Image: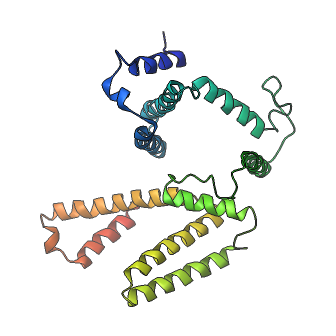
Amino acid sequence: MRYTLDDLIRLMDALRDPETGCPWDLQQTFASIVPHTLEEAYEVADCIEREDWEHLRDELGDLLFQVVFYARLADEQKGFDLHVIIDQLVAKLIRRHPHVFPEGTLDRCGGDAVAVAQVNSNWEAIKQQERDAKARGGILDDVPLNLPGLSRAAKLQRRAARVGFDWPDVGGVLDKIEEEIGELRQALAQGDDDNAREEIGDLLFAQVNLARHLDIDPEQALRNTNAKFERRFGHVEAQVRANEQDWEQLSLEQLDIWWDEAKAHGL
């Protein structure tokens, strides 16, 4: 026997029961759960990056539990429940995939063959129609504030690019990066910490723009570099221990030699 989605909903109901539920779960609100949701999403991404399929099952379950929790809270406030969430999700995905559901229902699937680029174009056009229908106003209004900084920068740039506010080619972005580096150097030379902080932000934003033009996910690229740094620094640390020396006894030149060894070993 396997538990089902209905069993998970029953479990959530029990946890939130005012008389017999779990004290911790009863204290939670929409806002208090958000940090846990973000953490679970990152743990899912981490398992995928490490190809840890066994633990991925657990992490996906934890992420699903977050959705069920939010649905329960909304139901308690007479807003909506999990069934409404699923209904709206299915309707939205049918609407956004007219090449798969040409009649707008699940009853008949399949349509004319379409290229991925056309799918992406149609997807964005439909999403824009949905935003217009919501009368949200500005083009950037519904870009989530809680996205990681690099991801949000890329999303803001993609949204602006759709209305033509974009560099025509990579060359313009590279020039902008060099301009931002010059402005950062000037701020540092002037000892202007506030301006330096702003220029660093501008430089990062321009670098995200370069990644977007090269069709590279900046968040993923940085995560890969973080992992590479950890591997190489781990080699340096191992050499320090193997030589039975303290970090303070070693020159930067010696540490760089071990760093280069790590690079040569493909770490």
- For the rendered model, the colour scheme is rainbow
Residue lying furthest top in this view? 1
Residue 8: image location, x then y, percent: 48, 19
Residue 239: image location, x then y, percent: 22, 63
Quick check: 85 above or below 117? Answer: above
Residue 214 in view, yes or no = no
Residue 93: image location, x then y, percent: 71, 36
Residues 156 and 258: in front is 156
Seen in the image, is 239 located left or right of residue 261? left
- Looking at the rendering, which quadrant does residue 205 occupy? bottom right
Seen in the image, is 157 located left or right of residue 56? right
Seen in the image, is 139 located left or right of residue 13? right
Residue 258: image location, x then y, percent: 28, 69
- Residue drawn 81% across the image and 38% down it: 98
- Looking at the rendering, which quadrant does residue 226 occupy? bottom left
Residues 223 and 230: in front is 223
Residue 14 in view, yes or no = yes
Residues 97 and 163: in front is 163
Quick check: 71 above or below 206? Answer: above
Residues 44 and 257: in front is 44
- Residue drawn 57% across the image and 25% down it: 81
- Looking at the rendering, which quadrant does residue 237 occupy? bottom left
Quick check: 253 above or below 57? Answer: below
Seen in the image, is 27 located left or right of residue 69? left
- Residue drawn 41% across the image and 43% down it: 35
Quick check: 219 above or below 114? Answer: below
Residue lying furthest front in this view? 78
- Residue drawn 40% across the image and 56% down it: 227
Where, quadrant-wise, is the C terminus in this rendering? bottom left
